[in-house]
Image: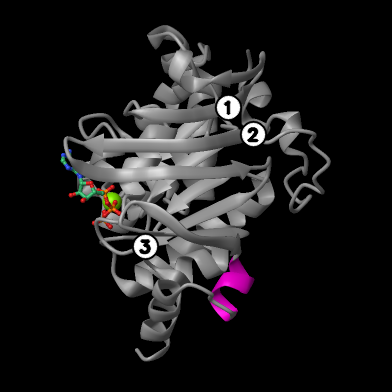
Amino acid sequence: MTYQDMALPPPCQGGGEEGGRPAGGADQPLLSVRGLTKRYGARIGCADVTFDLWPGEVLGIVGESGSGKSTLLSCLAGHMAPDTGEVIFDTADGPRDTRTLSEAERRRLMRTDWAFVHQNPRDGLRMGVTAGGNVGERLMAVGARHYGDIRAAAADWLSRVEIPADRIDDRPRAFSGGMQQRLQIARNLVTGPRLVFMDEPTGGLDVSVQARLLDLLRGLVRRMGLSVVIVTHDLAVVRLLADRLMVMKDGRVVEQGLTDQVLDDPQHAYTQLLVSSVLQV
Ligand SMILES: Nc1ncnc2c1ncn2[C@@H]1O[C@H](COP(=O)(O)OP(=O)(O)OP(=O)(O)O)[C@@H](O)[C@H]1O
Ligand SMILES: [Mg+2]
């Protein structure tokens, strides 16, 4: 497999580099979630969550601290097993309930089809490995072997996330928080994943750094036609990135719909509070 093969988004995502959002037309969701519930002992992590994610769609999940956002994302991404419910992913071999995958199959999906951007870049990077190595490692995990190609791909991705070319041999611990987060994004997107999970990717950064990162993310999502599930408590993030929005409270989805609709005309009292508290700032 050459770098060129891997750098291109899979065909199902439509849209080339300048193609914008896919026009749709897929006949089944990429991810289909039904009645997903996860408890920690007696405490509810998330309960009875149901939704579909279509190819090329960005789903935002918002809600206060402790509302179950990270729990839900962990269950979707296979980091944690839900107690009940279904998570059907449209794999290359057809729809599969991810709960029934073998450990080897799950690990393969994590390497190839899925990406996970953690809130803390340290959880998603190898801090002792160079920036170029962090990106190249993901390519090697999907079969790239040619050193020159891997290095070229890593350099290309560093430039896409605005990391200067002369930092390629630096280790992430020598980077600022914003640079680390951009490196984590490059490491995750280099293999052209079909589904990207993000947990508060702009959390913990300065406001000005957040704005730039958000801009960069929006460009990548649009150009690559990525399918994304993004957790955040920042309504500005969902306003900019998400096509659809899901609002959680106490582990349950209290409202979902098109992002603009939910934010401009919130129906649930909690969403109204969320929206109005932002407007007052
Ligand atoms: N490992 C755990 N053990 C026990 N309870 C947990 C664990 N992780 C989460 N919880 C509980 O599950 C509920 C949902 O937590 P979760 O971390 O999913 O919320 P969140 O929406 O991601 O919050 P935050 O915005 O603060 O990240 C909370 O009541 C939390 O206390
Ligand atoms: Mg969380």
Whether label 2 touches label 1, CB < 8 Å: yes
Name the residue rendered at 50%, 56% in the picture: 60
> What secondary structure is marked by label 2?
loop
Q: Residue type at mark 2?
A: Leu
Whether label 1 touches label 3, CB < 8 Å: no
Name the residue rendered at 26%, 48% in the picture: 120
Residue closest to the far left: 41
Q: Position of residue 137 (x, y in %)?
A: 40, 23
Q: Earlier in the sequence, mark 1 or mark 3?
A: 3
Numbered mark located on residue 63 in the image = 3
Cβ at disc 1 under 8 Å from ligand 1: no
**Circle 2 Cα neighbour tier, 10 Å, few/some/many (<14 / 14–19 / ≥20):** many
Numbered mark located on residue 128 in the image = none
Cβ at disc 3 under 8 Å from ligand 1: yes
Frontmost residue, 280 versus 140:
280
- What is the CA distance from the residue labelled 2 to the residue labelled 3? 24 Å
Q: Which residue is mark 1?
A: 89
The kind of secondary structure the magenta stretch mainly shows is helix
Quadrant location of the N terminus?
top right
> What secondary structure is marked by label 3?
strand
Q: Which residue is mark 2?
A: 30
Please give the range of residues in magenta. 259-264
Does residue 187 appear in the picture of this structure? no
Q: Position of residue 264 (x, y in %)?
A: 58, 80
The image quadrant that residue 95 belongs to is: top right
**Circle 3 Cα neighbour tier, 10 Å, few/some/many (<14 / 14–19 / ≥20):** many
Frontmost residue, 174 versus 178:
178
Q: Residue type at mark 1?
A: Phe
Q: Earlier in the sequence, mark 2 or mark 1?
A: 2
Q: Residue type at mark 3?
A: Gly
> What secondary structure is marked by label 1?
strand
Q: Position of residue 135 (x, y in %)?
A: 42, 31
